[in-house]
Amino acid sequence: MEDLLCFMLDLYQLHGVPVAISEVDVDQAVVDLRSALSEHRAVRKKTEKKGRVAEDHHTFLVLDRHLQGIPWESIPVLRGRSVSRIPSLNFLLDRLHLATWQRRTTSDEHEFDDTRRAGCPGDRIHIDPRKVYYVLNPSGDLKGTESRFASWLKQMHGEGWDGIVGRAPSEQEFLNALSQKDLVV
């Protein structure tokens, strides 16, 4: 626990966020973390003994740029659960509004057509699956990934896909991809 806390504080300092480590009571923070985890464990055991297993809801992580490097999904309390990283709470609210709107419109007896799309709060854009540009292994250090996907991506050229493998795109290649393609992967 102490290592995790120190790692997080070091990450903040590495990214230019001033942290007065000398003022942080690491021992007390570790005690607080352990007590919170033991309380959580006790509540979970109590509900399991009563025969009720707590519902496993989806967890959304909104992380700032300094904490995104930590593999939060791999910590024991989140491992094996449904977890998604999202850029902001506004993004989550927009997705919830869109889902509500879609449920309402699919319950109608009419088929979906483009004239009904105008009222969509999330107003989706159309992506042509034939206008895709990909960059695979731009730094050249993921040979296993490159060998796994390169042949499939070459097959996708027949579908209109274009891209590069094993090197970083030039600035002009990237600008062309962003301006001429519907999706850049």
Image (tube, rainbow, N blue to C red):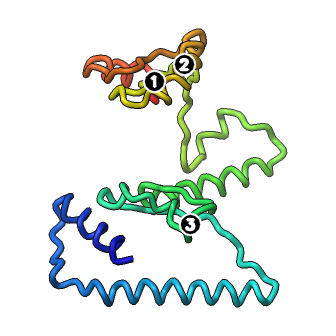
Q: Place residue 134 in its image quadrant.
A: top left
Q: Where 134 sits versus 7, above or below?
A: above
Q: Looking at the image, which residue is at 40% across and 88% down?
A: 32
Name the residue type under label 2: Leu
Residue under label 2, please give it: 153
Q: Which secondary structure, mark 3?
A: loop
The image position of residue 11, as x and y in percent, is 26, 62
Q: Are marks 1 and 2 in contact (CB under 8 Å)?
A: yes
Q: Residue at x 54, y 13 (%)?
A: 154
Label 3 or label 2, whichever comes before in sequence order: 3
Label for residue 134? 1
Say what secondary structure mark 2 lies in. Answer: helix
In x, y percent, where is residue 118? 59, 40
* Amino acid at pointer 1: Tyr
Please tell me in which quadrant of the rendered image residue 59 appears. bottom right
Q: Is 138 on the left or on the right of 154, as rendered?
A: left
Relative height, residue 56 to residue 133 (above, below)? below
> According to the image, label 3 marks what residue?
78
The mark nearer the N terminus, 1 or 2, is: 1
Closer-to-camera residue (86/12): 12
